[in-house]
Image (cartoon, helix red, strand yellow):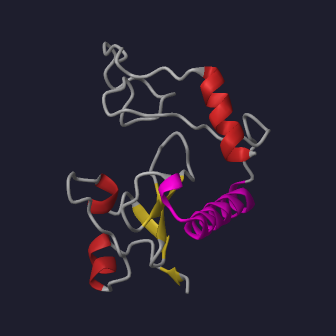
Amino acid sequence: MLCATSRTESLAALRENEALNVTANASTSCELCDTAGGEVLWHDDFARVIYAEEADYPGFCRVILQRHVREMTDLPPADRVRLMDCVFAVEAALREMLRPDNAVPHLHWHVIPRYCDDRHFPLAIWAQPARPGAEPDKRRPIPDRSALAELLRRRLG
């Protein structure tokens, strides 16, 4: 069942209500396990939606899984669908409320391998670099495009 929360309800209050099943990664600290990640607009036992407080992007929300999972493909298929349903609901609510025009009006996804020592981490790759002088790690593998295409053919049919 979905559970609406007051916009001012704190992470501590949510945890007291045992509505937030956030588990920390045992080996490292995770900001999204250790904090709400922003103002909680909605939550249930599976996911939460937070307001990201990005001044240049009013309405910027994040959908965050309640338990610690590193990557979307680590989720079982049913959980992927459930999480994406939450993403779709957030998109629909924002489109209804704000009526944004899309800079690239063609549906697409950015799938970008990220590394903790990349120039922009933890920011988006299109942000100003967090470490402007940092050079790319030359040890990182550069995918062979033919091999990547073959792997995609095997996975996608």
Q: Residue at x 67, y 29 (%)?
A: 149
Q: Nearer the viewer, residue 16 or 8?
A: 16
Residue 140 in the image: state x and y as whole percent: 39, 22
Main secondary-structure element of the magenta-colored stretch: helix
Outermost residue toward the right in this view: 106
Tally of numbered tags: 0
Q: Residue at x 47, y 74 (%)?
A: 46
Check if residue 82 falls in the magenta segment: yes
Q: Nearer the viewer, residue 134 or 152?
A: 152
**Stretch in magenta:** 72-98
When the figure is inspected, residue 129 is found, relative to residue 42, above or below; the finding is above
Quadrant the N terminus occupies: bottom right
Q: Quadrant of residue 120?
A: top left
Q: Residue at x 45, y 52 (%)?
A: 52
Q: Residue at x 65, y 67 (%)?
A: 85
Check if residue 131 falls in the magenta segment: no
Horizontally, is 74 left or right of 32 in the view? right
Residue 25 in the image: state x and y as whole percent: 26, 59
